[in-house]
Image: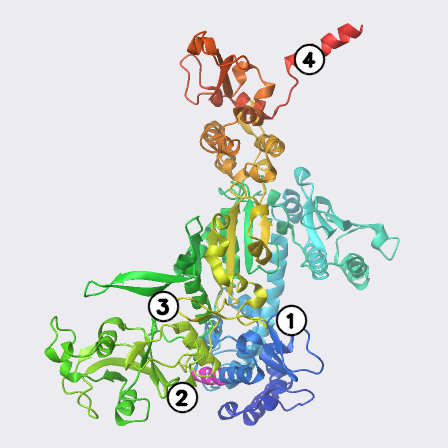
Amino acid sequence: MEMIEKQQLWDSFLARWPRERLSNMTLSEYVSINDQDTFTYWLETKTRSLGSIQGNTSAKFGIYKRGSDGKEQSGIGHGEIYSWRTRYGSDEKSVFAYVKNALVTIATAAYDGNLQTIEMLDFAPLVKWKIAFLYQNQQAPVMINTFSGPMLQVLTDSTANTPYPEMYQKLINNKGQRNLLEYGKACWLEANQKKALLERKTILKHFTHIASFNEGLAHWSEDTITAFCEVISQAHELKLDIYITAMSSGGMIRIGRKDLNQKSAKEVFATFEPTLSKIKFEQRFLNRDNYLCSDVTSELLSDLLESKDFVNFSNQYPITRKPLWPNDYSDEYINESIDGSDISDEIQQPKRIYNMVNTSLNQIFYGPPGTGKTYHTVEAAVKAAEPKFKWHNRDELKAEYDRLVAEKRIRFVTFHQSYGYEEFVEGLKAKTTDDKSIEYVIENGVFQNICEDAIQSGVNTPSEINPNGRVWKISLEGAHQNATKSYCLEHNLAAIGWGDSGDLNQALHNEYFDALGKNDKGTLSYFNQDMNIGDLLVCINSKTSIEAVGVVVGEYQFVAEGLPTNEDYCHQRKVKWLCKDISIDLKKLNDDTSFDLKTCTPLNRISVTNLLVNLAQENVWLDESQIAVVRKNYVLIIDEINRGNISKIFGELITLIEPSKRQGQLESIELTLPYSGRLFSVPDNLYIIGTMNTADRSLALMDTALRRRFDFVEMMPDNDVLKKYGELDVKGVKIDLAKLLEQMNQRIEVLFDREHMLGHAFFIPVVELISANKHSQALSELKQVFKNKILPLLQEYFFEDWNRIRLVLGDSNKSDSNCLVKITEQSYNEIFGSDHRLGNFDTASKTYQIASFDKDDNEDGSIWDKPETYQAIYSVKNTPDTVDMTNTLESRED
């Protein structure tokens, strides 16, 4: 289509759907079935040549009309005719109100050039940016007709986290005098070319840690490189796994089916030998006999892709998960560079948890001490809070974690035996008043605070509002319409009477104030002392409903002349009235209770978050520039979750954390909190991550209610983490740390259970030194690990049963001089004398002593300084006594 025709199409769209008409659009005009004149049909189909948004489901429009019965899907609600995204509302009326407001916001902001508002809006990206493009001011354009984030990233050399407005600004800066549509077409062509180069670079990057691949790549022709990338790309697109084998001999690339938890492949389709630039295809999957092994060329590629070989294999071995790249597997080669040296000084923990597509809302990492639970909690929290965030090393991950903690989107709490509901959800806290009396105030716990913040993240909140502030009710000279109320609302004021009491900021009050009743004094105290800047103020028009909402922006002041409408209203505060001329009933939100009769009083049953959410559900928006915002994910990390009394801590809220009972779900539940009387629910953008040490408490002993509501991820000792860094070598004596850990854990499992094993993380400081080729220091560090970590744990596990500790350390296979737990035997006669009368069963006392870690003056060092000591722990040998007994029996038979 020529540019003139495209411009005419653009003009036709604006003539049919001018900005002014969007606010009056009906649902049937917005979306329907078999109607080619709806807004969505124009947007997706008629104007496709102006920029495509094809793909994904109809849910991208927020609400859509079905042609059949609705299928149950997470996040999708159904009515008789329409289906919708549940996060926009609970019925078609409220959802379409949200959608329509979003359309108006996008169109207005686009015309004004305010792309940041559109960026913050919770709406499908392709759709909202297509709408923005169509409604921008063509005389001062701010964006081109490319709406795909990845394409814009490629075109502007941006990262995945770069905002759309920033990328559009960069492109518009380079437009010059060119026609916008012609420039957009040129950008699209350039993006496709750059995308192809980027895809090729990305594919090759998956294999650059293989020595043979880099060796072969240096000699490949351009055709061979192109063909190789096409083969790999096609295999990945058809959901074939791509993995590495034979790393010790240089590395080979295989295409087939290999699950993460399997050591060997289920089936191999092809094997690529980089140095030979050949692919060996398995004969039984090919349609011809002469296709066993060929050079990788463009001719081979063309022939292969025209055949159905890839498709046949994929159909024979189907999967529902994403296909895997080499780095998705065991990280045995992730930290190896071309010459075999480390590319990172940091020791990587195993990447065995987060190959899952979705992160569970409730999950617990459990396992013995030292298995990486805390380490993986950082990764889990970031993945939950920012699913799109990508990192290349631990430093980047930790920096993002720290940022999210600073923003309070990730919070941390530790359970313990005395931790309770009052600290976690809400409770009463004693407070000393100005007159030295005690009053009890309701204080939110960490769980209620993060739930409210998570809910509020999806609601527009003007910057003046304190999310953790209070909600106050005020009666401006009565609930009825009056001149004082009109004046206050028009001039952004809140005012109350009792002017003769004088300035309340004075240290001493006058006789008029002293003569007032308790309720009147309470009202004045609330207005003067307790109300804070950032609190919300609602002006009532009946016993249960409000007509205006404002935020307190000024301190208390005494104005002697009062108001023009009433000279008695001398006590005043500056209030920014955010919305007026409304009528919203808050009785249900106020626990079905009418407002207090006091002129000014706190609404303790209503939180700032609950009020804002309620207003949004009633289509009342406090900030017209932000009709809707992007909901952010929040994470609560509960360390040592098994050490707390779950029933005592969660109370009745244990049900609310279930995914199906979360706010926004079809089976969502609200409960009334016992202290504040507030309605409370847990949002579906709050992730709860717990850790538990099975050495403290077995999983079998966990509260059943908790076990049913959490996904449990087992974290067991991983010897492979230690294997990949080789053996500790001191003067030719090698210590196999993986075998050492494996042998001790095998003994612990037999003597106790698998929940009390030793974790690989204890040895991370040792392998860090090994990787730095500091083997002598690594031996010293190993000594400290045994002294400060392992031996204290063994003493705790076996309750000072030294015989079992000796068995774990392998002392039963050693001579007395080499034992790590020394036994001293002394007769009772030597200790007490011959007349001790302790009976005939025990005649001597055995005492146990751990071999000294300090250096002996008669030796080069203690036994713990010798590498042979650690070898002996895992080297199982027959004892001399066993050999002698065998020889004796054999001689007797003879």
Task: Tell me the CA gap for discs 1 and 2.
Answer: 35 Å
Separation of disc 2 and disc 3 at Cα? 24 Å
Q: Judge by depth and name the residue closer to the eye, 35 or 280.
A: 35
Q: Horizontal placement of 889 versus 794: left or right? A: right
Q: Is residue 296 magenta?
A: no
Q: Can the viewer see residue 780?
A: yes
Which one is earlier in the sequence, the residue at label 1 or at label 3? 1
| Residue 108 is covered by the magenta coloring | yes
Q: Are marks 1 and 3 in contact (CB under 8 Å)?
A: no
Q: What residue sits right under mark 4 in the picture?
A: 883
Disc 1 residue crowd, few under 14, some 14–19, many 20+, Cα 10 Å:
few
* Label 4 CA crowd tier, 10 Å (few <14, some 14–19, many 20+): few
- On the question of residue 353 being in view, the answer is no
According to the image, label 1 marks what residue?
A: 73
Tell me which corner region of the image, top left, top right, bottom left or bottom right, holds residue 358: bottom right
User: In this picture, which residue range is highlighted in magenta?
Assistant: 104-112
Q: Is residue 425 left or right of residue 334?
A: left
Whichever of labels 2 and 4 marks the residue nearer the N terminus, that label is 2
Q: Are the residues flagged by discs 2 and 4 in contact, CB closer than 8 Å?
A: no
Q: Farthest residue in the right direction?
A: 289
* Residue at the spot of label 2: 582
Q: CA distance from mark 1 to mark 4?
A: 69 Å
The residue that mark 3 highlights is: 468
